[in-house]
Image: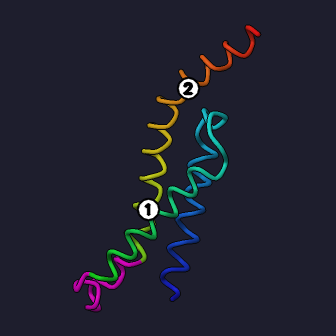
Amino acid sequence: MGEVLLAAAATAAAGFIVWGSDPRRSTYGILLLPGISLAAGLAVWIILQFTPAVTSAAFSWLTWALPVLAGPAAAVAAALLTVSRRLPRDNAERARILKL
C-alpha cells in the first residue's frame, strides 16, 4: 500500500513540476499535466503488479521506481503535443472574438 501512495504522490508532484517549468503553461489548465502524470504512473504501477518479475526481492524496487519515471515522461509528452495542437486554434478563436 505504501508503494502506491509513494507512486501517486511522486508522479503528481512531478506533474506539477513539469507544469511549472513549461513556459507555455497558460495554454492549458493547471491540473492537466499532473493528472496525466498521475494516470500514467498509476497505470504503470498496476501493470507492474500483475507481472511475475516484481514478486522477487531483486526486482521489487521496480514498483516504485518505474511509475515515478513514467509519469513525468508522459507529462512532458502531453505538454509538447497539447501546446502544438491547441495554440493555433486558440489564436484563431481569439482573433474571431476580437473582431466582434
Query: Which mark, by number, is residue 87?
Result: 2
Marks 2 and 1 close (CB-CB < 8 Å) = no
Q: Is residue 60 left or right of residue 24?
A: left
Amino acid beneath label 1: Ala
Which residue is at a point 64% across and 20% down the rendered structure image? 93
Which residue is at the front of the view, 59 or 9?
Answer: 9
* Percent position of residue 15, x then y: 56, 55
Which residue is at a point 47% across and 55% down the rendered structure image? 72
Residue 90 drawn above or below residue 47: above
Amino acid beneath label 2: Leu
Q: Is residue 42 left or right of residue 23?
A: left
Residue 56 drawn above or below residue 92: below
Residue 33 drawn above or below residue 3: above
Instruction: Determine the CA span between mark 2 and mark 1.
Output: 24 Å
* Percent position of residue 34, x then y: 58, 56
Q: How crowded is mark 1: few (under 14 residues within 10 Å), some or many (20 or more)?
A: many
**Sequence-first tag of 2 and 1:** 1
How is the rendered protein coloured? rainbow
Q: What stretch is highlighted in magenta?
A: 51-63
Q: How crowded is mark 2: few (under 14 residues within 10 Å), some or many (20 or more)?
A: some
Determine which quarter of the picture holds residue 23: top right
Instruction: Name the residue that disc number 1 marks.
Output: 40
Which residue is at a point 46% across and 60% down the rendered structure image? 71
Q: Quadrant of the C terminus?
A: top right
Q: Is mark 2 on a helix, strand or loop?
A: helix
